[in-house]
Image (tube, rainbow, N blue to C red):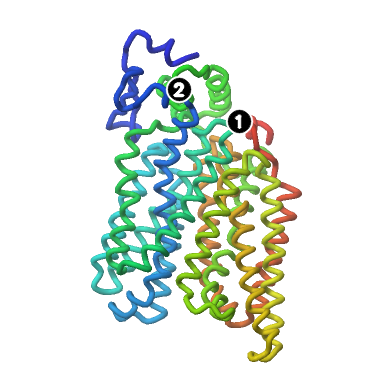
Amino acid sequence: MSFREENDDGRDLKKPFLHTGSWYRMGSRQSSMMGSSQVIRDRSVSVLACVLIVALGPIQFGFTAGYTSPTQTAISSDLGLSVSQFSLFGSLSNVGAMVGALASGQIAEYIGRKGSLMIAAIPNIIGWLAISFAKDYSFLYMGRLLEGFGVGIISYTVPVYIGEIAPQTMRGGLGSINQLSVTIGIVLAYLLGLFVGWRLLAVLGALPCLILIPGLFFIPESPRWLAKMGMTEDFEASLQVLRGFDADISIEVNEIKRSVASTSRRSTIRFADLKHRRYWFPLMIGIGLLILQQLTGTNGVLFYSSTIFKSAGISSSNIATFGLGAVQVVATGVSTWLVDKTGRRLLLIVSSSGMTLSLLIVAVSFFIKDSVSDESTLYSIMGILSVIGVVGMIVAFSLGMGPIPWIIMSEILPINIKGLAGSVATLANWFFSFVVTMTANLLLTWSSGATFTIYMIMSAVTVLFTTLLVPETKGRTLEEIQWSFR
């Protein structure tokens, strides 16, 4: 089946945006919206363009996460915030994200993946403007909650959209762009925060979503969502544009139709249905990986990185934190290149094993530091060793545990429970992110060595969990992956 064959009569194909409303014209091969035919015929360029547009969402996600690090001193001074008030400001994004995550699956199911990203972009923009014009903590808190709500929706919708539009041979690499964009957003916040004030930085934070909104009008909706909603012509047109005019999509169309036919789009899943392996097993894997992603303590390590750098004799903690973020971007970029070559499962095992070893180094370093004199050479050596351990942990995390749990979550959940199950998995991730962020400071004050030992144990549990339970999804269609659980 080819788009060229179906459209030779010159008729324009139209595709709904936000389910109803604006129309996205796919038109003839000479359509100016599509650009050159060379670009359209290259499926990788066509899909990559869609991924790069929706990747503005995760950049916004990362910018939100990184905003508080370079602005704490200035905001606290200008608005007279106490340490506890600023800590609450920082953590409110997690609270908002939990609410957004809870709603994300249902929003994405009812108005589509593009529609949910539009819903997410608007509160993000309002939130950044509220922070920029804040005169007291009330506007700061409101803005941070709104940002978090949008980020909660983005964190579910973007990996699902990418997973549903990507060819099976490129799905891992394109899916990793989600986490790569998050790290780029964090680094941008760190870098720009060195040069501009906190109000201007908040205005700059709104730019990704301001660009995302018009960009959504130029990309097709997820063909799998359209098929589930019974929009057969729109689903085939969307898939043809994503694969190229000359591509034969008949096999992929039939696979998607068979998958959708096996479930009714109006059917509801009862708790009793979860006893079936095809539901509980992928749900357990998706939720398990996203919870372990947080319990391995990456947020706690990043939170404590400036103190670790200071203890190693590095005077400028902001520049060191930026350097750590840059390392994370590079490592995530390597993962993007590797994931479709080595597979998800192997990278997860290597990543969690590397984290276990790195956290062991950090834990031992702190235990030794606590038992020797501050003036001794051994104390200085342990400080340097702890920095090496932290950098190693971030590199290992970025190679697998950062991007891959989101990729696997988008791949393994059956289409008829993806909305509800995806919301639960995303909510669990944000809840444990909140727990780790809020408890890190207390645990580190109690015992740094013991804290990193706890994180190390959770990394070791992740190695076992992945080795025993997580299937390899490389090179398989979404329909093949989901049928394998039956």
In the image: residue 203, left or right of residue 417: left
Q: Quadrant of the C terminus?
A: top right
**Residue for point 58% across, 61% down:** 294
Name the residue that disc number 2 marks: 41
**Residue 111: which quarter of the image?**
top left
Q: Is residue 153 above or below residue 270?
A: below
203 or 407, which is in the foreground? Answer: 203
Where does residue 295 sit, x and y in percent of width and height?
61, 63
| Mark 1 secondary-structure assignment | loop
Q: Residue 336's quadrant in the figure?
A: top right
| Left or right: where 230 falls relative to 478 | left
The residue positioned 69% from the left and 33% from the top of the image is 484
Disc on the earlier residue, 2 or 1: 2
Q: CA distance from mark 2 to mark 1?
A: 21 Å
Residue positioned 41% across, 59% down in the render: 188
Q: Percent from the top left, x then y, of residue 421?
A: 55, 45
> Mark 2: which amino acid?
Arg
Label 1 Cα crowd, 10 Å radius (few <14 / some 14-19 / many 20+):
many
Tag 2, which secondary structure? helix
Residue 243 can be seen, yes or no: yes
Q: Amino acid at mark 1?
A: Thr
Q: Specify the quadrant of the image occupied by residue 272.
A: top right
* Rendered position, 18 above or below 293: above
User: Looking at the image, which residue is at 63% across and 76% down?
Assistant: 384
Residue 477 badge: 1
